[in-house]
């Protein structure tokens, strides 16, 4: 069997998945040299030290170290230093193989080709695979000012409260818009936030720059002003990333806006509701803020479809008449307590928990 197909099958055991596709085969051939792909077949999704990888591959420790460092520098495998030793592991298709090579910017012929291939793969295969589990891998975070002060707001719905647990902050280019090149919308690209281990990796590999907690807060405000939706990993424990993106380019949101996938993203615990007596019918909420076409302005007042609303709060924060507010959903989507619980739950729903455990032992 071809080494790239073997690598795809290995990547496919991850909760995100990696369905077979001619586009993804070419992506792997661009991202990995044959020698890199062969070594990557010995990696798992948990960091392993060089001596362990050398033992599995039969290669010298120097060869393993040099090859892994080259792959990590390209952003196609993950590295983490622990007690002075560097460990290396595979990255999922999303977030990882797609995003990291674009986070430092694009514009080269290689980036242009990758962007086209990823778009094809997303539309034909990866998008539906990513969003096929009843427990979504990502969730929407509401604009904080739209729910602050409400006694029912939960700690993991308040971005600044969750960020108190993070210690490293990084800012990168939005891979979704960068990968689309001239076909991307005009929203800002320097708005992708990463935290802690993922942040340190991308900073060290020069795919992102280190910022302060205050700069991270400012980035969130800038993203909100631009009308970008906050999405993050669907767990309560800690933030790994905050994707600030749009309904036309975002790999996550287009699972809903373009693919009509079954479980694209978990909504926030809230939805927006219009007070018809206060609404002036200006249309700002529908024309400039809503990414999901959840607002109908054909009548005298705007009307919001609760089922279509993802609870981002972008319409609430900019309503000039202050006619829109956030309402707690009667049935709130459950949020797994930890990232590990999230991964295990998705793997069970997709029927590959055993394969994932076997691959990582």
Image: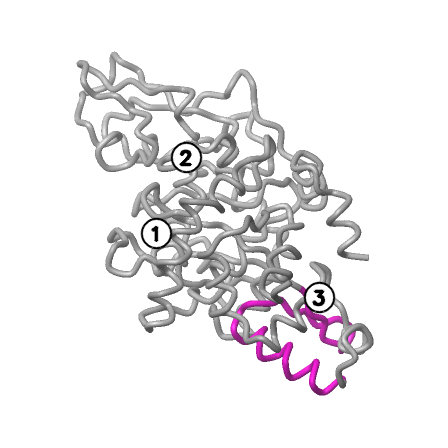
Q: CA distance from mark 1 to mark 2?
A: 24 Å
Front in this rendered view, residue 33 or 198: 33
Please give the name of the residue rendered at 35% of the width and 58% of the height, measured from the top-left corner.
116
Residue interval drawn in magenta: 61-89
| Residue 201, picture quadrant | bottom right
237 up-or-down from 268: above or below: below
Near mark 1 (Cα within 10 A), the count class, few <14, some 14-19 or many ≥20, is some
Q: Quadrant of the N terminus?
A: bottom right
Would you name the residue on which mark 2 appears? 256
Please give the name of the residue rendered at 42% of the width and 45% of the height, measured from the top-left corner.
124
Please give the name of the residue rendered at 32% of the width and 57% of the height, measured from the top-left corner.
180
* Residue sitting at the far top: 277
Would you name the residue on which mark 1 appears? 222
Would you name the residue on which mark 3 appears? 43
63 up-or-down from 166: above or below: below
First reached walking from the N terminus: tag 1 or tag 2? 1
């Amino acid at each position: 069997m071809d080494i790239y197909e073997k690598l795809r099958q290995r990547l496919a055991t991850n909760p995100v998945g990696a369905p077979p596709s001619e586009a993804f085969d070419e992506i792997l051939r661009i991202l990995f040299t044959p020698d890199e792909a062969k070594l990557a077949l010995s990696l798992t999704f948990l960091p392993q030290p060089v001596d362990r990888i050398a033992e599995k591959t039969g290669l010298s420790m120097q060869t393993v170290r040099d090859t892994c460092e080259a792959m990590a520098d390209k952003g196609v495998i993950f590295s983490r230093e622990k007690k002075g030793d560097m460990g290396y592991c595979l990255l999922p298709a999303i977030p990882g193989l797609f995003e990291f090579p674009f986070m430092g910017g694009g514009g080269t012929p290689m980036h242009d080709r990758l962007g086209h291939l990823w778009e094809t793969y997303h539309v034909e295969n990866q998008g539906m695979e990513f969003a096929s589990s009843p427990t979504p891998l990502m969730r929407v975070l509401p604009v904080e000012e739209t729910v602050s002060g409400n006694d029912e707001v939960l700690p993991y719905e308040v971005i600044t409260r969750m960020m108190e647990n993070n210690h490293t902050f990084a800012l990168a280019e939005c891979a979704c818009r960068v990968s689309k090149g001239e076909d991307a919308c005009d929203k800002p690209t320097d708005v992708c936030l990463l935290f802690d281990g993922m942040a340190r990796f991308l900073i060290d590999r020069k795919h992102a720059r280190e910022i302060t907690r205050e700069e991270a807060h400012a980035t969130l405000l800038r993203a909100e002003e631009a009308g970008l939706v906050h999405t993050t990993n669907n767990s309560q424990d800690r933030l790994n990333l905050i994707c600030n993106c749009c309904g036309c380019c975002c790999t996550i949101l287009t699972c809903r806006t373009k693919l009509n996938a079954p479980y694209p993203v978990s909504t926030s615990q809230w939805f927006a509701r219009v007070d018809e007596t206060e609404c002036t019918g200006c249309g700002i909420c529908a024309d400039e803020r809503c990414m999901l076409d959840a607002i109908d302005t054909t009548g005298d007042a705007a009307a919001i479809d609760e089922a279509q609303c993802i609870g981002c709060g972008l319409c609430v924060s900019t309503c000039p008449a202050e006619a829109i507010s956030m309402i707690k959903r009667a049935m709130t989507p459950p949020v797994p307590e930890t990232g590990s619980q999230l991964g295990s739950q998705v793997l069970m729903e997709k029927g590959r928990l055993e394969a994932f455990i076997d691959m990582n032992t």
